[in-house]
Image (tube, coloured by chain):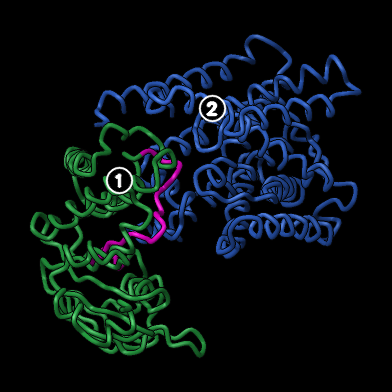
């Protein structure tokens, strides 16, 4: 029987991961002036983990995931620059905008598999087009928005840190609660889940909205950190691609998977970038292909398969 | 317990179910025989809400089930298995059995006890930390049965439980199914092509043909019915 000890060990492993991340990212500003590497490490951990909510737990593959990031960035910029909201309120507005866009797109959850993925991608393009058609005095037009008056990298770093803490709390709730179990059942077989009492519509909505709010917040905080927002950067499909790759490399469906995948691959990405700037994308691509071929379930998934007796301890 | 009256299901011009009427008394096993395409699985799909009946009434303990969604029908006490087992493949056996209990108010100890009881009953307890996809097809059928039974259903719908199962596991399945009404108080609707198992387990049998009931009665009555002999049993 899965006794209380097994469950306790799993919770302790996860608590250890959360404590290490919290402590590590909290003290970085006291150790170095170069915040950028750790800022973007947090960004990718959040993006990949939130992607895991909807892909790893609920079984949806939103190729248009970047839409939430983009609308979050623009919501922050418009609220701060045009409507003169203070940055904290603008960021809350970005999160709410992400949730609203998530609700608007919720009917697409009726689709499954590649159909959902393609529609999601098309809607991301539609979101980009919608913003490009909005009045230029609101969005900055083709030049985008500059937020230099809000420049405060350290504050932006800690804002991302707060988003990371919120993400970890949400991940804990989604994965270890009854909702998490129901989501995994939906991922494996939606119809069978309904037949054993799972409310499919409301359960997957929880994962979907969670997966919409975090990239929107991240888009807003990143806009604050870089002080610049433009359509090409905010709706760059590489953001979706990296979120997927980092989450899958670590292991979809596990809480620690996207964290490990983001930490590892982002680190490798930066290393290659410094050593071989011209071959960066090529070498990173080769590493990703090898990883997917050799470990299709990701690092954590492969570990769980190889050491099946330890599986019950992996959060 | 279960009362079905005038149940019809049409797919366009095709009458998949053409006015079914039958009852399943408490603590009994109803065997359902029929050739491929006779409407057996469609009937199960209508009872548990996967399909919405075109007309007719499905009542469990006097309460109408027609029009409810599968999750609501499960909450009323109806569980089912599928012809091809549909386990939650990337979840452990232990977690598979947690899913039907999500909407039940039980203590953790109660949940653990009933999961352990049913996994032991179907001889899968030692594999409880394995992923369901690592089981054989026959073991997945046993897991699916255990997954339903942990929720203490009033009515269990079993769709071809013996198909593709080796004789040893088939024997185990037969023993478990036979004991279910007595041990848990449930009733069972057992759809199968396996005549031996149906005759051995069922208190009552209906034979379906082209969406209608061709014959009903105990094993002896059904076997000697000339319509059944001609349409289904051959010879």
Is residue B101 visible in the rendered structure shown here?
Answer: no
Residue at mark 2: A302
Q: Is residue A44 magenta?
A: no
Q: Residues within 10 Å of mark 1 (few under 14, many from 20)?
A: many
Mark seen at residue A39: none
In the image, farthest residue toward the left: B182
Q: Which chain letter goes with mark 1? A: B
| Image quarter (top left, top right, bottom left or bottom right) of the C terminus of chain B | bottom left
Instruction: Classify mark 2: helix, strand or loop.
Output: helix
Could you tell me which residue is drawn at 78 percent across and 27 percent down?
Answer: A286
Left or right of B112: which side holds A203? right
Residue corresponding to mark 1? B97
Visible residue check, residue A1 = yes
Q: Is residue B91 magenta?
A: yes
> Chief secondary structure of the magenta span?
loop
Tell me the shade of chain B: green
- Give the residue at x 17% y 38%: B109
Q: Chain of mark 2?
A: A
The residue stretch that appears in magenta = B72-92
Asked where in the image residue A109 lies, by quadrant, the reply is bottom right
Q: Given contact means CB atoms under 8 Å apart, are the residues at marks 1 and 2 in contact?
A: no
Q: Position of residue A5 (x, y in %)?
A: 27, 23
Colour assigned to chain A in the rendering is: blue
Q: Residue A304 at what x, y percent from top left?
A: 47, 27
């Amino acid at each position: 029987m899965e006794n209380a000890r097994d469950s306790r060990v799993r919770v302790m492993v996860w608590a250890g991961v959360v404590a290490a991340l919290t402590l590590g990212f909290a003290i970085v500003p006291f150790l170095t002036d170069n915040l950028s590497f750790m800022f973007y490490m947090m960004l990718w951990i959040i993006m990949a983990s939130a992607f895991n909510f909807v892909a790893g737990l609920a079984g949806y593959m939103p190729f248009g995931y970047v839409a939430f990031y983009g609308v979050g960035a623009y919501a922050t910029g418009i609220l701060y620059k045009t409507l003169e909201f203070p940055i904290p309120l603008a960021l809350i507005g970005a999160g709410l905008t992400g949730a609203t866009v998530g609700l608007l797109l919720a009917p697409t959850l009726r689709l499954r598999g590649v159909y959902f993925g393609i529609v999601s991608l098309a809607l991301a393009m539609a979101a980009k087009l919608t913003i490009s058609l909005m009045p230029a005095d609101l969005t900055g037009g083709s030049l985008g928005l500059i937020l230099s008056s809000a420049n405060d990298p350290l504050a932006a770093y800690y804002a991302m840190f707060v988003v990371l803490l919120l993400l970890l709390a949400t991940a804990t709730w989604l994965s270890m609660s009854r909702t998490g179990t129901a989501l995994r059942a939906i991922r494996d077989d939606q119809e069978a889940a309904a037949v054993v009492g799972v409310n499919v519509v409301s359960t997957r909505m929880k994962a979907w909205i969670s997966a919409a709010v975090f990239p929107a917040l991240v888009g807003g905080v990143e806009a604050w950190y870089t002080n610049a927002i433009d359509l090409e950067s905010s709706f760059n499909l590489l953001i979706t691609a990296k979120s997927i790759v980092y989450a899958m490399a670590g292991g979809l469906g596990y809480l620690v998977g996207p964290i490990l995948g983001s930490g590892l691959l982002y680190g490798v990405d930066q290393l290659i970038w410094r050593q071989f700037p011209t071959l960066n994308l090529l070498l990173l691509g080769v590493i990703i292909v090898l990883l997917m071929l050799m470990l299709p379930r990701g690092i954590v998934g492969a570990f769980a398969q190889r050491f099946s007796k330890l599986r019950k301890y992996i959060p | 317990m279960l009362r079905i009256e005038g149940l019809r299901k049409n797919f366009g011009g095709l009458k998949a179910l053409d006015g079914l009427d039958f009852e399943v008394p408490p603590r009994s096993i109803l065997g359902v025989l029929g050739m491929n395409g006779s409407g057996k699985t469609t009937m199960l799909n209508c009872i548990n809400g996967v399909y919405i009946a075109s007309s007719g009434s499905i009542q469990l303990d006097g309460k109408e089930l027609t029009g409810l969604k599968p999750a609501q029908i499960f909450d009323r006490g109806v569980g089912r298995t599928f012809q091809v087992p549909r386990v939650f493949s990337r979840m452990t056996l232990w977690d598979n059995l947690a899913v039907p209990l999500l909407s039940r108010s039980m203590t953790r100890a109660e949940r653990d006890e009933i999961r352990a009881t049913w996994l032991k009953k179907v001889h899968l307890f030692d594999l409880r930390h394995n992923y369901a996809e690592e089981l054989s097809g026959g073991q997945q059928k046993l897991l699916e049965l255990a997954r339903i039974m942990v929720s203490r259903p009033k009515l269990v719908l079993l769709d071809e439980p013996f198909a593709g199962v080796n004789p040893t596991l088939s024997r185990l399945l037969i023993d478990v199914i036979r004991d279910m009404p007595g041990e848990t108080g449930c009733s069972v609707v057992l759809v199968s092509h396996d005549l031996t198992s149906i005759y051995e387990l069922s208190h009552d049998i209906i034979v379906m043909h082209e969406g209608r009931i061709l014959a009903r009665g105990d094993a002896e009555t059904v076997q000697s019915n000339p319509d059944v002999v001609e349409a289904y049993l051959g010879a």
